[in-house]
Image (spheres, rainbow, N blue to C red):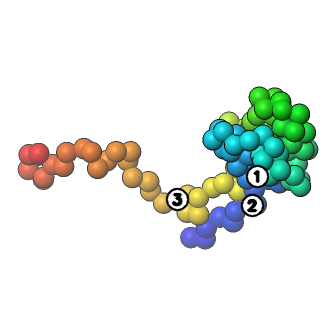
Amino acid sequence: MATPRKTPAPAGYGEIEKALHLLDMGESARWVAARLRGVANPAALEAEALLRAKERSAARAVLEAELLRLAGPEDARDLGWFSPAAPEAPRPAPLAWLRPRTDPSGRA
């Protein structure tokens, strides 16, 4: 079975996600603004200007809203670019390794 082709991530998604992570880590606003320079996304430009004006929380709100917009609807129909290589592959049950194993006779 052929694997579905991934579409590229929307412009600026990775850079915006990284900028939010850097803000969470406590990096300086000027340094994060420099990382957003040249990103092909209007929200990134707005956040860069806000960070240079020392409006850290406003810049964070702009970046978070844009990240949610780029991610698409909650049901993830627009996240074709984020899908795994083989979505039909079965996934292990969460924490399956913690469950006690039983032998065929039913004993633990």
Q: Which of the two residues, 82 or 36, is positioned nearer the viewer here?
A: 36
* Total marks in image: 3
Q: Mark 3 points at which residue?
A: 88
Report whether 79 appears left or right of 42.
Answer: left
* Residue farthest to the bottom, as pictured: 2
x and y, in percent, of residue 38 in the image: 89, 55
Name the side, left or right, on which 6 lies relative to 61. Answer: left
Of tags 3 and 2, the one toward the viewer is 2
For badge 3, the amino acid type reads: Glu
Q: Is mark 2 on a helix, strand or loop?
A: loop
Residue 7: which disc?
A: 2
Residue 83 appears at what percent x and percent y?
63, 55
Q: Is mark 1 on a helix, strand or loop?
A: helix
The percent position of residue 77, horizontal first and vertical second, equals: 70, 45
Counting from the top left corner in percent of width and height, residue 16 is at 76, 47
Give SS at disc 3: loop
Question: Disc 2 versus disc 1: distance between alpha carbons?
Answer: 17 Å
Q: In which quarter of the image is residue 60?
A: top right
Give the amino acid type for the residue marked by disc 1 in the picture: Glu
Q: Residue drawn 83% across and 30% down?
A: 55
Look at 70% across and 62% down and name the residue there: 6
Query: Looking at the image, which is closer to me, 62 or 98?
Result: 62
Give the residue displayed 38% in from the left and 47% down from the top: 93
Numbered label attached to residue 15? 1
